[in-house]
Amino acid sequence: MKIHDLSPAKGSRKRPKRIGRGPGSRHGKTSTKGHKGQKARSGGTKGPAFEGGQTPLQRRLPKRGFKNRPFKKEYAVLNLKDLSKVADIDVITPEILLENKIIKSIKDGIKILGDGNIDKPLTIKAHAFSSSALSKLSAVGGKTEVLKN
């Protein structure tokens, strides 16, 4: 058997239906859409939420909740275990974290979380601290300074 002898199995390939190409194709004139009516016209279907004219479900249900989008603060979070990468520095600031590529961007500020342990007293300047991070830092004699945005 050679490559030019290969062909698909009989009946496995079907030609696409070419509609609107004249009466000889048997799919001309109305292009298999029948005569007139909504479904024969362009854009002639209702949206997925259409329920036959009754008020759709997404309008019957009440709105709930609250989105604080314009005032939401998105912090770049950092755990105590990540601070071990800059162990030789005593005062850690957002600029030092950016220089050492520990964080990619400051966003609306930096928040220090308490996952991991810290073994030496550090002075950390950040925009927010979790309560567990504050307790672990104070336990080893570290200092925290909250920066303003």
Image (cartoon, rainbow, N blue to C red):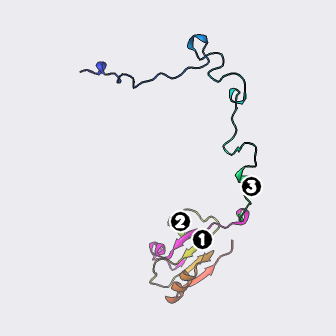
Question: Which secondary structure lies at badge 2?
Answer: loop
Q: CA distance from mark 2 to mark 3?
A: 45 Å
The residue singled out by tag 1 in the image is 110
Left or right placement of residue 118 versus residue 8 in this view: right
Q: Which residues are magenta?
A: 69-91
Question: What x and y, as percent, mark residue 124?
Answer: 56, 79
Say which residue appears at 66% left-offset and 22% top-offset.
34
Question: What x and y, as percent, mark residue 147?
Answer: 65, 76
The residue singled out by tag 3 in the image is 60
Assess whether mark 2 and mark 1 are in contact (beta carbons under 8 angstroms).
Answer: yes
Q: Residues within 10 Å of mark 2 (few under 14, many from 20)?
A: some
Question: Which secondary structure lies at badge 3?
Answer: helix
Image quadrant in which you'd find residue 67: bottom right
Q: Return the disc, 2 or 3, that comes first in the chain's sequence.
A: 3
Q: Give the farthest residue toward the left.
A: 1
Q: Residues within 10 Å of mark 3 (few under 14, many from 20)?
A: few
Image quadrant in which you'd find residue 85: bottom left
Q: Return the disc, 1 or 2, that comes first in the chain's sequence.
A: 2
Q: CA distance from mark 1 to mark 3?
A: 42 Å
Q: Could you tell me which quadrant the C terminus lies in?
A: bottom right
The residue singled out by tag 2 in the image is 103
